Image: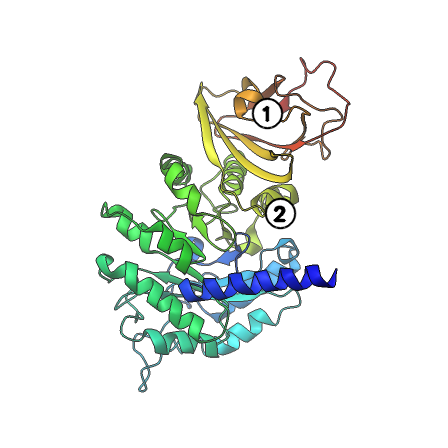
Amino acid sequence: MIVTTALRWACCLIVVVIRGLNGLDNGLALTPPMGWLAWQRYRCITDCETYPDDCVNEQLFMRAADLLVSEGYADLGYNYVIVDDCWLAKNRSADGKLEADKKRFPSGIKALSDYVSNREYGLKFGLYEDWGTKTCAGYPGVLGHEELDAKTFAEWDVDYVKLDGCYSNVRHMDKGYPEFGRHLNNTGRPMVYSCSWPAYQEEKGMLIDYASMAKHCNLWRNYDDIDDSWESMIKIADYFAQKQEFWAQYAGPGHWNDPDMLLIGNFGLTYDQSKTQMAIWAVLAAPLLMSNKLSEVQPQFKDILQNKEVIKVNQDNLGIQGTRVFRDKGIDIWTRKIEPFSDGYYSYAVAFVSRRVDGAPYPYNITLEDLGLKNPNGYSITNLYGKEKYPTPCIYKPNDPVKVRVIPSGVVFLRMNIDDSNQLCKDNSRSQFFK
């Protein structure tokens, strides 16, 4: 046992050393990051007198930290509190350092970081900057100050850096983003590194080096900013599906494709549409970064965000990004390989998403084999959004049909675990998974 453990540690050490020579070496984000990010809900509101509850200031992020803990989000893994754009002063200090806006962040970023990270449940602090001369909102960027700014983030005990790409040369991002990542590494402080360069190069039609991305970044934004609407959310999901054969291969423990923030609890998504976003993001192994007003999230939306079984799919240790595998009769089918895995067969998460507009729940049938599930011993099935909290009492074989009824713009989200029991479903002709 001692020899085995020693060999295991030696192998791990070799992997870490090799990774450190080639790219990011922080050992972080082994599952998709979870937390809360300000931008989608709060944007760049800086008029604190007119909008005291919605202003981008230190109190906003202190409240968010408090609510992640008191409302139970932190217990489920939502542990990053991330400051987005508009926290900065308009100019650097006399010695060239970044500074927070003194009126809205009078205590300074280090004090805010200390407040967030000292919470009882191990919250972590994230901060936004831009690989350009200015941030997207016009505040100082890191370009020309990369090493100094990385050291400053480390001094402030930052745990997560989101680096945007406004006011920069997109042709130089392939070198600039990895260079900044090396500066983060050199500080000796582990910081999750969220890159944005594919989102900017994608819109220019450039060939993006995703192999380098996966080597140098923990996660990266691939596409447009999400807006608070079903149209925006489903457009991003469709684009991920179009690119999935290329993009999915680069996702895995420590490096993730990022379709942007969760809208759940805001204005734009209905209850069923919110369940759909959560399901698709779970299948995509996407970061779960809420951007909402935590104090006003209604109970039914909170239940979606805190669905332990859906979070478990998202955080699956295999880290395999799922894909959209079939479109039929207005139903999109998304699947993801998950644990448990045995004898060459995976378990699966399967989301049936309705794109129909006929205003009624739609019945849809398909066999497990046609979904790609071929374990001869069969599968037990759990409805992750259903009233049933336990797997089906019998198992489905590959040639058995699965029957669902899906609400318009809604989802039926099933977990199908490999099963070696002998309790076959004698007659599932009437069984049906709904909502």
Residue wearing tag 1? 374
Residue 87 appears in the rendering: no
418 left or right of 335?
right
Label 2 with label 1: CB-CB less than 8 Å: no
What kind of residue is marked 2? Gln
- Name the image quarter holding residue 135: bottom left
Disc 2 and disc 1: Cα gap in Å?
Answer: 31 Å
Badge 1 amino acid: Lys
- Residue located at (59% from left, 25% from top): 374
Picture quarter with the C terminus:
top right
Q: Is residue 2 left or right of residue 238?
A: right
Question: In the drawing, what numbered circle is on residue 306?
Answer: 2
- What residue do we see at 39% from left, 69% from top? 182
Q: How is the image coloured?
A: rainbow
**Residue 99 image point, x, y percent:** 38, 78
Horizontal and vertical percent position of residue 127: 44, 67
